[in-house]
Image: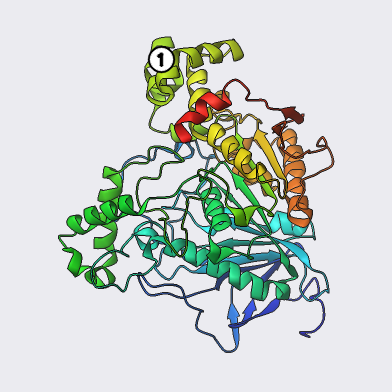
Amino acid sequence: MTMNNPVSATVAPVADTTSGKVLGALNDGVMAFRGIPYAQAARFERPAPPAPWSGLRETLAYGPAAPQVNPRGGGPSPVILAHLPRPAGAPPPPPLREDEACQVLNVWTSGLRDERKRPVMVWLHGGFFAVGSGASGDGAALARRGDVVVVSINHRLNVLGFAHLDDLPGGGFDGTGNLGMLDIVTALQWVRENIEAFGGDPSRIMVFGESGGGMKTGWLLASSAAQGLVHRAAIQSGPGLRMMEREQAAGITDQLLHALSLRPGDAEELRRMPLDRLMAAYFAVAAANPARSFTDLSCFAPVLDPHLLPRHPFAPTAPDQARDIPLLIGWNAQEMSFFMGNDPQGFSLDEAGLAARAATYLGPDTQSLLAQYRARYPEASPARRYIQSFSDEQIMAPTLLLADRQSAQGGAPVFAYRFDWQSPALEGKLGALHTLEAPFVFDAVDSQMALTGGTAQARALARQVSAAWVEFAATGRPAADGLPAWEAYGDQRRVMALDNTSRLLADPEAGLREKLARRHL
């Protein structure tokens, strides 16, 4: 093929990177390059540029994910998705391919060397800071629109990406509490240096992430290491107001060393020991320190660092460096049903059961808040009000708190949404659960048939939502045919309610927002 001409519709695509040429695959007008190395790193070392290669490197399959499976096996998944029925005859999903050398990324584009510069959408996967992979964000449908390049990333997770070893005697572990984030920073640097060869615009890079990916996006908005690498940001159901305090992270490190029968001075052993032994210890410590909420991270998560993250991302205020970055932020109406895979009783609570559970997250305001929920949702069952109130406390309240703090800077606009579309799964019990918006953002609802039903209404909303995200990547303002004019959040706290008929609302959570936010201040 001729390297200086636009790629034809029938020729396998080849692109140049700073490390060498890569061969992708062409499918229905979209070119996909999967598993491109963007860095290399030894265990507990900072990422470095990948080793260059000669000739043509095939990038046709997803690369390995970070190690994340318990070598000793685990119990039933608390995630409701694992409990949904699979279509008749559908094979089980293949086992996850893992490797410590997981610094790879994927690119989808509709044009190479065609003299166009498309906005770039970089997807950060969910799974808090413990699990997941960039394969969760297939960008083919977005790229097929012809005006955006999509990138997804694998990076180090859990103990390999966020074990805070910096304060151990002997040194040599600088920045280990944020290695997973440094991988992402290095990937964004790769994007800045290489994306023009894939038809992208390095001056319009949008980072968007769901759940843990949203928290990672918040870290990037606050870290000097990422300054200048992010031009728009979207935080989907991942209000990362705070990361881990250094003293707290050091305590987790003590537990890890104890689980491995190591003394602080023996930390170099962590670099050499078999991975299974290290991962087994990690899972033991993680089980003893379960996550308490989306805003109070308990273990193996990014750590405050005088050089990388000297302050919490959005507490008590928004970071100055994020002032001029447009932000799209939102949540799903019934987030927490996602985490009820091992909680069938939660779907059949009576009033007493609701009150007992609510006291654990609503505190002294339990009775008055439950009265507000009864008045606001008079037809809802106690179980549905449990899901609603728990979701609001865990994700709605800190999401709007983050939006308030970013908007208060008076810089680039903030745009907020609430995803209201109801999943038909399990006879509608799940509502708009955590992660449900993602296949709509990627215009890929048919890939999640168990949740979306593959209906015409789901496809229509997916076209609107994905178009709004693409427009935000291009211009810093979301908009799409079929959606009302999307005004900025501002003093009126405007929120776009995304549904079969979407509406722009003014402060729709008034009366609940401030009371629920108290636990997150």
Say left or right for 322 vs 183: right
Say above or below: 240 vs 385.
below
Residue type, numbered disc 1: Ala
Q: Quadrant of residue 138?
A: bottom right
Residue corresponding to mark 1: 355
Instruction: Say which residue appears at 60% left-offset and 47% top-offset.
Output: 235
Q: Quadrant of residue 69?
A: bottom left
Disc 1 secondary structure class: helix
Instruction: Say which residue appears at 61% left-offset and 57% top-offset.
Output: 321
User: In front here: 199 or 356?
Assistant: 356
Q: Give the image location of residue 148, x and y in percent.
A: 75, 60
Instruction: List the single residue furthest toward the bottom.
Output: 54
Q: Give the image location of residue 319, x and y in percent.
A: 57, 52
Which quarter of the rendered picture does the N terminus lie within?
bottom right
Say left or right for 345 vs 437: left
Say above or below: 162 vs 212.
below
User: In front here: 145 or 207?
Assistant: 207
Q: Give the image location of residue 139, x and y in percent.
A: 66, 57
Mark 1, Cα crowd under 10 Å, few <14 / some 14-19 / many 20+, is: some
Is residue 24 among the parts visible in the rendering? no
Instruction: Say which residue appears at 54% left-offset and 63% top-offset.
Output: 224
User: In front here: 348 or 357?
Assistant: 357
Q: Give the image location of residue 272, x and y in percent.
A: 25, 73
Instruction: Say which residue appears at 58% left-offset and 83% top-offset.
Output: 19
Is residue 296 among the parts visible in the rendering? yes
Say left or right for 469 vs 453: right
Say above or below: 484 vs 361.
below
Q: Quadrant of residue 366?
A: top left
